[in-house]
Amino acid sequence: MRIDKDLVAASATPLVLGILAEGDLYGYAILKRVGELSGGSMQWTDGMLYPLLHRLERLGYVDSSWGTSEAGRRRKHYAITPTGREALQERHQQWTVVADALRQVWHTAPRPPAVTEGWA
Amino acid sequence: MAQPELEAQIDRWRSYVQRRQAISPADVDELEDHLREQIAERRATGLDEDEAFLVAIKRLGNLDAVSREFAREHSDRLWKQLVLLPESAHDDAGTPPWRELAVVLALAVGAGIAVKLGFTLFNNENAFARNIGLLVFPFLAGYFAWKRQLTLRVGAVLVVPFLALAIVLNVYPFVPGGSTEILAVLHAPVVLWMVVGLAYMGGRWRSDGRRMDFVRFTGEFAIYYVLIALGGAVLVGLTLGAFSLIGTDFEPVLGQWILPFAVPGALVVAAWLVEAKQNVVENIAPVLTRIFTPLTIVMLLALLGVIAAAGGLADVDRELLILMDAILILVLALLLYSISARDSLARPGLFDGLQLLLVVAAIAVDAVMLTAMLTRIAEFGFSPNKIAALGLNLLLLVHLVRAAWLTIGFLRGRRAFLQLETWQTRYLPVYGAWAAVVVMVFPPVFSFA
């Protein structure tokens, strides 16, 4: 199942912040983690991650530092900041509300049989 | 692990991405790291190099969309910013970034000290006016000598005209306030500017391309100098106002210390700014040319109309002739800067037609002036001023007529634009030579009157 791209975009910020809250990472590793967490069904355009990371950095949610990879290349690492943690907390609450509301809708509405196919 | 094929592909990709203005070199590094990780992982699952590269590129996404996203995040990057002191010198040839600034400031202060010394050394105003260029321009030439790392031989060639001018301007027994002295004062800077040009071109004096670069430099330099002067004037005005309200007389300090240092110093600084910005910020002179070419055509036509209505120029005074000379030089500058910015491969367009109109109108004005001058000379005889003006007008006429001829040929598709361009660069030294003649030959011929 592919996830709708608006949904991917909306969840990108909390997802990245949440992943960075587990520990500092670089771009490629963040994307790999996203793949693992969603079982491969959240497909990002790889290049789009970086403008997002730069935006989060400008907002003060993450910090970046240049290091070197095992192969000796320049590599930029990202770490979440206290402001970022607050933002993550807030997003968490928002998403909990959304998820709760949706869960109730799923319970009351009967599930149409073919709805899982052809969503994306 | 040597993978020449893959490395070449990544290099090509890099240079392709780097052309995007919104993506900075550091971002490209970051993306490249990503790309290489992705390739390594694909290779580990059994894909070959090419396949892995293609998959990695595909997953990176449409470059246009990605760079749009970068642009949205970094909109400032779409405005070219002038970085005078690069943050890290790691891609430079090891020269510390502040060294150039130090050289520039030293030369600027040096020019200020030279002018200040000149004030005290030359006890009369005329002698100071004759030497002012000699006090300042060597520092400008010195900056380019340093910047271009001129060889000793080239440097020596540059020193000769400075020395020759210094000797002529100070040894000739000028009659104080005479025409030949005023002419020398007016023409010496032209000669000196040509010498600065030689330094700018770094010894490649015969190269048409380098000459055109110097033309471009001259236009940008003039604009930057004016901008600096405007900023300085605002600052001085505010300071003067504040000091006078407080009750302190600021003018002696301004006249004796600030202006003698600021005015020549700004010349060196302006030259440095133009050098630093040449690749980064768009040239402004050609933009102004676009705006002013049509306006100048209207002005020239109006002028011709007024002259025709008045029935010729026979009894006009000298000031008007000087003013008209200035107008013709303006036309020449417009011509030169639109040529300097034009893509020589582009087809003839509307603007080329406008330019032809401008040149033809200028030729008409020049012809009227030459008639008036010849009439005056026939009536009152020769004088240094008249000959200098006549000479300049003849030079301008030759320049404009040939330019018009070549433009017509270009518009009709008979000639390449390049011919028009080389005509400009080949002809420009003639003005320097003429200025040198006015400075060096006129005074003895007219017995220093």
Image (spheres, rainbow, N blue to C red):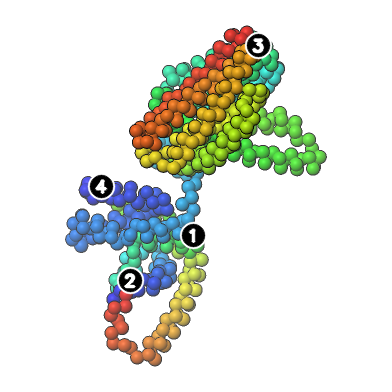
Between disc 1 and disc 3, the foreground one is 3
Labels 3, 2: front one: 3
Q: Around disc 2, counting alpha carbons within 10 Å, would you say few (fewer than 14), some (14 to 19), or many (20 or more)? A: many
Q: CA distance from mark 3 to mark 2?
A: 90 Å
Residue A13 drawn at (x, y percent) = 43, 68
Binning the other alpha carbons within 10 Å of mark 3 as few (below 14), some (14 to 19) or many (20 upward) gives some
Q: Which residue is mark 3?
A: B449
Q: CA distance from mark 4 to mark 1?
A: 34 Å
Given residues A6 and B434, the one toward you in this image is: B434
Please, is residue A115 above or below residue B297 in the view? Answer: below
Q: Chain of mark 2?
A: A
Disc 1 target residue: A58
Badge 3 marks a residue whose secondary structure is loop
Q: CA distance from mark 3 to mark 4?
A: 72 Å
Whichever of callouts 3 and 4 sits on the residue coming sooner in the sequence is 4
Mark 1 to mark 3: distance in Å? 71 Å
Mark linked to residue A42: 2
